[in-house]
Amino acid sequence: MVTKLIGRFLLWTFAVVVLAGAVSAAVVAYLLFGDRSLPKVETSVVIQPGASAGDAARELQAAGVINSELGFRLLARAKHLETDVKAGEYRFAPHLSDAEILERVTTGGAQVAVWVTIPEGFTAREVAATLAEHNLGDEGSLLDYFLHTSLDLARGVRSVNLEGYLFPDTYLMPLETTPAALARIMTDQFRNELPKDSEARAKRLHLSIPQIVTLASLIEREAKADDERRLMAGVYYNRLAKKMPLEVDATLEYTFAHHKDVITRADLTRDTPFNTYLHLGLPPTPIANPGRPSLLAAFDPQKSDYLFYVYKGKGHHAFARTLEEHNANVARYEK
């Protein structure tokens, strides 16, 4: 009799557990696939670069797009999508299930803006290519706009084009856009990064703001270590003051259709306004888009007697005051 009672009790307990499990599974399934109470209204959410499914779940729950961060994470794990979240800005229509939300943030559906990183030293051509890779427009149209649009920099001072002013940074770019709107985002950031007293500094340095930005672009392409940028800027100012050719390889490279590892003697004789071996002064426009360290270095050069430098490895240069010292450095480091 006792044995039968124990058996019935165990059977009843098992039935209760199974029923509870079934109810729980049904509730979870409803919350993930059937519950469409959220979002209550159209809602925008920004997912940061590098975000995991867990990071996205926290943002989505905080914005009122999903009910349960944990449930969303478990759903992502079950579907093996934990690392497939795409960063960007999303706009969700009202009343979507968690499964539909997950599908959108892992495929880019409902995305209205994408994160784009413009590295320091990119040219306008490279910026246009990067934007096109993110489906933000036609590369040719973007480049045409960048190279045929000027920027108002100060009272009566305008740039030749936008080369040098498409500030390198990570941006949230709208997908429904135009070349003008994209350029404005980057040039507005450039204005933010300019020293507040840039006009006064330019006057003290006896150059215009566009000329200093051009000089900053040379620093960007030549310097590798931040602690040398101001010193390198000083070299350029010293050579300009002495009316010496700048002789910067990077200005020649700017005219090449493709990157070259070695500058040849024939290259040094190419008659282009960007050949700073043949022509005195700065090139007519920047040769790249400088980042903040190079821009600040150009506006605040380090004073020295140096007129030359040569790369010596490990991100640093050897600086020299005389041609004799420079030739010795070249012989030592360019073996």
Image (cartoon, rainbow, N blue to C red):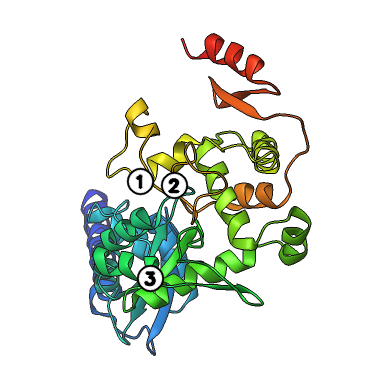
Label 3 near label 1: C-beta < 8 Å? no
Q: Residue at x 52, y 67 (%)?
A: 159
Q: Residue at x 68, y 57 (%)?
A: 207
Question: Residues under labels 3 and 2: Cα distance?
Answer: 18 Å
Return the residue at label 1: 255
| Picture quadrant where residue 229 is located | top right
Mark 2 closeness class: few <14, some 14–19, many ≥20 residues within 10 Å? many
Question: x%, y% of residue 26?
Answer: 24, 71
Question: Residues under labels 1 and 2: Cα distance?
Answer: 7 Å
Label 2 near label 3: C-beta < 8 Å? no
Q: Amino acid at mark 1?
A: Thr
Mark 3 closeness class: few <14, some 14–19, many ≥20 residues within 10 Å? few
Whether residue 141 is visible, yes or no, is yes
Return the residue at label 3: 148
Is 264 or 54 nearer to us in this picture?
A: 264
Badge number at residue 264: none
Is 119 or 15 nearer to us in this picture?
A: 119
Tag 1, which secondary structure? Answer: loop
Question: x%, y% of residue 263?
Answer: 37, 29
Tag 3, which secondary structure? Answer: loop
Q: Amino acid at mark 3?
A: His
Label 2 near label 1: C-beta < 8 Å? yes
Q: Residue at x 32, y 37 (%)?
A: 259
Mark earlier in primary sequence (1, 2): 1
Question: x%, y% of residue 59?
Answer: 46, 68
Return the residue at label 2: 274
Taking 133 as reference, is 165 left or right? right
Q: Residue at x 32, y 53 (%)?
A: 82
